[in-house]
Every structure is written in C-alpha cells, then in structure tokens.
Amino acid sequence: MKNKTLILARVMLKNGGGFGFNLKNKGSLALLLLVLFVSLPIMIYGLVEMIAFFYEGLAPIGQEGVLLSWGLVMSSLMVLFFGIFHVVSSFYFAKDIETYLPMPVRPRQIVGAKFLVILLYEYLLISFIYLPIVIYFGVREGCGLLYYLYALLAMALLPVLPLALGTLMVMLIMRMINLTRYRELLRIIGGTFAIFLGLAVSFAMQKFNQITPDEIEELVQAGSNSLALLETKLFPTVRWAVQALLHYQIASGLTSLLIFVGLSLVIFAALLLLAELVYIKGVIGISEAGSRRQRVREDDLVRLVKRRPALAAYLLNEIKLLLRTPVYFLNCILPEFIWPVFFVFSFIVVPDRDSTRMLAALTSILNDPNTMGAALGVTLAILAFIGGSNGITATSISREGKELYIKRYIPVSYRQQLMAKLLSGIVIGYAGVVPVILVLAVFLKVPAYFTAIVMILALLPLTLTSMCGLLLDLLNPKLEWDTEQKAVKQNINVFFTMLFSIAVAVIMIAVSFILDLTLAWALIVLPVILLAGCIGFYYLLATVGVAAFRNREG
Amino acid sequence: MITLEHVNKTYPGGVKAVDNVSLTVPSGEIFGFLGPNGAGKTTAIKMITGILHPDSGVIKVNGINIAENPLEVKKQIGFVPDDPNMFLRLKGIEYLNFMGDIYDVPSDERKARISDLCKRFEMTDVLRDPIQSYSHGMRQKIVIIGALLHNPSVWILDEPMTGLDPRSSFLLKTMMREHVDNNRTLFFSTHVLDVAEKICDRIAIINRGRILFTGTIDEMREHFRKNASLESMFLELTDNEK
C-alpha cells in the first residue's frame, strides 16, 4: 500500500499550480528571464561578496566555522519567520482541507502532507542564503564530496525544527479558538497572534544569543571554530548540523549527522502525534459562516441602502475583501502593520547596547542639516520597500481568480477598475506606513517639518511600487486557484514587485549619497525621480495594462 | 433585441466553441437557448455580455454594437451567470448596494427595488448575513436580485433555475413573463427541456458551436413532421450531429 501522506502531498502540490508561472505566456517568460539574468546575478554577486568579506575576517583567527553556523541559524530563523504565515494560511484557511476531511485519512496524514508541501517552499526560500554560504565555505576549505552530501542532507532537514515549532504554536492556538462561537473572526485574531508570537520568538532568540565581549574573547583565544556553536544555542538541531559539516572527515562528524537526522525525524514524528490529537478539532467547521437572520423592516432599508460613486464602491469592495478574507488579511494587511511593532520592540522595549547606540546615531543623522538629504533618501527607500512588500496590487488581478469574469460584464471601464485597484494598494499602504513614520518621528526625535515632508512624499514610493505590482499582475495573473492562499502566497508577482521596490530603494539611497544631496536638493531630485517613474508606469497601465485587462478572457 | 451576425469564437488550443452563429432575439418573447453540455451556450452568452470577445462577427444589443460601445451595452443588460458563488465575503445588502452603485441606481429606486424583489424572493431577513452563509438556492436568488436591480431592459440568464426551490422557480418564470409582456428582451439558456417547452416562445438549439434550429416549438414539430416531445426532437437533432 502506498503511503497516504505522500499521495496527499503530491495532489496538494499538483493542485497548487506552482508559483503562477506559465511559460507559454510571453509576458511571463520575459519576466522570468529578466529575473534570472539580471536580478539574480546581481543578488548572488552581492551575497558572495558579503560572505567573502566575513570569511576573510574569520579565517585568520580560526573561526571560519562561524560562517556556517550563521548561515544555518539565519536559514532557520527565516523558516520560522516566513513559515508561520504559510502554516496559518495552509493549515487553517485553505479550502482544500474540506476536500480531505471526508476522506479516509488520518489527521496526521493531512498535517504531514501539508507540512511536506510547505517544506518544499522553504527550501526555495533558504536556498538563497544556505547554498551560497555552504558552497563558498566548501570551496575555500577545499572540502570533499562527502561535505556536499552532508550539506545537502542538512538542508533537507534544516527547516523541520523551525517549521515544526511554528506549526505547533499555530495548532495549539487554533485548537483553543475553535471552541468558541465567533470562529472566523477569532481565527483571524488567532492567526495574527500566532504570527506575532512566532516573530517574538525568533526575535527573542536573536537577543538571547548575545554574549559579553569577554566571553567572545575567551572563545576566540581557543581558536579552531570554538565560536561556531555559540550561535546555535536556541535551535538545538542546528548545532549538530554544524558539527557534522565542520568534522565531515572524521567519525564524530558522522555521529553528529546521525544525531541531527534522528532529532529531526523525532521532532517530525512528535508533531504528527500532536496533530492527531488537536488538528481536526481546530479545523472543523472551517468554512462555517455565522448567520443571524435578523428581521429587516422598511425603515431598516432606508438606513442600509447607501449610494456611492462607482469608483468608491469598487474601492470599498476591494478593501472589504482584503480585510475579511483571512488569508488576504494575514498576508497582505498584517505584514504592513508589523513593521512599527517590530521597530518599537527591537529598539525600545528590549534595548541592548547595539540598538541604543544605533538609535543615538540615527537621531543625530536625522537632526543634522548636513545629513538630512541622505536621511530623506534612506527614508524614501524604506518606504518603497515597505510599500512594495505588501503584495496588494501585485495580487489584485490574481485574487479575482475564477470570478474575474464578473469584472468584465459590469459597466465600469477597465481603466476605472484599475484605478480602484491601484487606490486600494495605496490607501492600505499609506495606512501601514503612517504608524511607522510617527513611531520613528517620536523615537528618533525627528523635526516636525521633516516628518511632515515624509508624510506627504511617502505617497510617491507607495504609488510607484503599487503601480509596478498592478502592471506585473495584469501581465501575468495567477487565476487558476482553488484556495485563496495560492493567489497570494504562491504568486511570483509579489516577489517581482519586491525586487522592483528594492531597486527603487537602491536608487533613492545611491542618488542621495553619491550626489551628496542637501535636504533642499533632495526635496527636488528624489521626488522628481519617483514622479517620473509614476508617470511612466501610469502610461504603461493606461495602455498595456488596460489592453491586458481587456484581453484577459479568464 | 439582441442580434448576432456571423459570430465566431475559437479557444486557444483550437476548439471552435461558436461557429458562424447568426441569431436574432426579438423583444417581447421568452427566448430559450438549448444545447447539450459543452455545446457553446455559455460561450455565446459570454460574448453577448462582453466577457469574451468574438474572433469575428458583430453583436448588437438594442442596436448598439458591443465592440464599439461596451459600457452602454453592459448598462442595458441584467446578467445572471451560471455560478452563483460570488461576493461570498459580502453581506447580502452590501452586495446589492455594490451592484446598485456599479449600475448607478438612484437611492429611492434602489430601496424600492430591493424591498420589492427581496420580499418576492423571501430574502429580506437574510440581507444582513454574509452570502457565505447562504444555501445554493439563496445565493442564486441574491444574484438574480442584484442583476435585476437596475431594471435592465435585456435579461440574460444562464441556467437560472438551477438550485431554486419550486416556489422561487415559479416566481422567476412569472417575472420572466412579466418582463417580456412589457416588450422587453429575455434570453436564457437551459438544458432542462421541460422548462423550455413550457415557457419559451421561441428556441434556438446549438450543438458543437453551430445553431441547428431556430423557431417556435410548433415550428420545430412541423420541421420534424411529428407530434413528438421536445426531448425526443432535441435528442434526434443533436444526435445526428455526432
């Protein structure tokens, strides 16, 4: 008999429709090639330069192993950070669960299969950090084939612990929440809570990892990679993986590897055991919606019937869907509002030596007239990045899915519909960055006029990145999905928009630093660049974008 | 009135869904569009409503060419698609307000229409509930109410009876008759032949993208020179095509 977990995982993967890439679509192909041959090499080049820099610093003191442990710990943190969004969406808000519930499969088989599918996506995520570091290390140290085999096995199992940790938290919270009546609302709150908890944990891990300079001194003296294991304190399995890679040539390396494999498998098994106990009770009634059957009288209707202009009605509908669909809320709205919390947490609530020093440095930069031009450039860069990472416009056509045809028969012009979609991204983006600006203004003691300038100018990078997202999604929408999660989580347009926003951020910083702009000049040059970009994209949206919408027959 | 002149549509992959179709749907008559599954009914309807563009041919609604003036045509149509699972995250009243705003229905008229239609379809007491909590039939009813809110002169209904209980089905048929009695246009697709036989003034039968017959049921009987049921004539007609 075939393993049902694997059968389920295969079906889930096939049904997922990949990342929204259709190689027969010319636009799609062009985008893919652009990323592969332009963005990716630049990114890898930057990464290798950075790794080399660290390696050169560490190797002379016999601590090059730190590089490996840093890579593995970073990968684990990334899995915990991003995985928890994925787990919440896939385990508790995906509609496909209802297809599997009536089948003769055990809860642990559903959870196991979903876990495996997420694991595949995590490999893709960590490969950008893990592979360059491990390969660089291997090449520089002249490691043999066995090292690379160990490294591959370590990569396969590395995400298991952090992902299991995230799944565990989510499952327990959801089990508690499903006891109550207002399930859907509480699920969103529970999901939000789980995400914050996950972030707090990964954050705390970094904080507790810090040690005093004296301790470091001692360990450095000891040499021979004594520092390497320091970083791994809070991900117990990582320690063994690092040991295995460092000592792959001797028996203790093999022992470490076996311990690592064994531990990972035990953790996976423990997760499945727990899933058997709590998963079904947490997921049952997933699509139930509360109904009140309230009498509506004539005078109620007077109140309930409200007339709005078509554009406003369309925009409102977009925003309502983003707020009410749990997957959209957790993936598109919530991340926007995490930034200020994150900032307050890392600099103010749990300050340490580094963050206090950094805060002081930032405060002086933001108040010094000589550096304010550069400060504006950096601020706009950050805003571009935040605006480009929410994925609201980058999934706005994809989110329509099979219902896109509705937008084709209603009597609203495509241009106006695109305007409403663009506005939804800008409105929510702006609502997300205002708290960031205010928090920064208060804690960095930014002059009021600078804050006011940033408040106004913030609209430019937000508009630019939202326009880019919308255009990309128009050219290459992911419309074939059966559960909302696939429209936003497995959508390559979000990634592309993020790349674009990084490019915008780099340009903002580069221009303000290279030209050494004063605030007055920065106020002219930077907005002009952003505005030019907006005008260019507006033209593209009004021509190529509208045509793509008109010709997108579903 | 709806007219199609030599309309063609081929899907990517080479399937010819609509093959040189010419059709006139006059006002004042219930016009049924019949055909087996995959015959091209929904494709034709999608082209009339502006969801799909024909590869060639001309489609006019009340004399307006949809290719030239799509928004004007869309405003005149009330369209009920075959799948009522839409706007599930909105409450009933929010969906109706949305449709009212999109079709530019003034407040007073909107209130009166919502009040009247919801009463007739017995939907008033669920207006404040999310559509997600509705049964299939209730979803179908709210979609029908939304589509008729702007009092369109042309109704296009794709399998409108699916999922409706007998009472609502009867009500819809009555409303369809009222609509054409005001000399307006009604075009609806179905594969339930009993329904077509009972309420249609005129039918068109489509199979593999081509119109096999257009006319009244009596004309069809004459065509076949026998007093058979629509079902047997339909089967004979579409079977010959294979």
Image (cartoon, coloured by chain):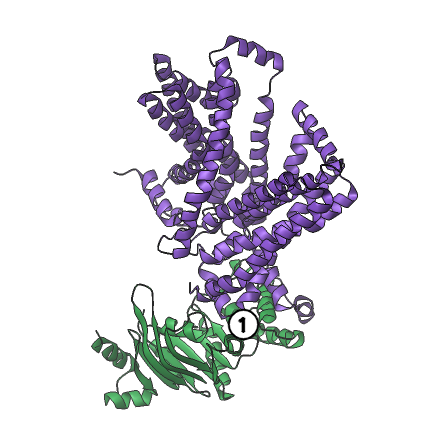
Chain colours: A purple, B green
Q: Is residue B155 above or below residue A441?
A: below
Q: Looking at the image, which is closer to me, A286 or A318? A: A318
Q: Residues within 10 Å of mark 1 (few under 14, many from 20)?
A: many
Q: Which residue is mark 1?
A: A411
User: Measured along the vertical axis of the image, is residue A248 above or below residue A386?
Assistant: above
Looking at the picture, tell me which residue is in the foreground, B207 or A342. A342
Residue at 68% x, 31% y is A347
Against A396, residue B205 (above or below) is below
The residue shown at (41%, 35%) is A123
The residue at the far right in this view is A448
Q: Is residue A122 left or right of residue A150?
A: right
Picture coordinates of residue A537, whole percent (x, y): 55, 57
x then y, percent, for residue A93: 49, 47
At which x and y percent is residue B101?
A: 61, 69
Residue B191 in the image: above or below residue A101: below
- The answer to whether residue A458 of the structure is visible from this angle is no
State the image coordinates of residue A538 (x, y, percent, origin top left): 57, 60
Q: Amino acid at mark 1?
A: Pro
Who is closer to the viewer here, B178 or A503? A503
Residue A44 location, quadrant: top left
Residue at the image point whose x is 70% and y is 43% from the top: A437
- Is residue B14 visible in the rendered structure shown here? yes
Residue A350, image quadrant: top right
Q: How many marks?
A: 1
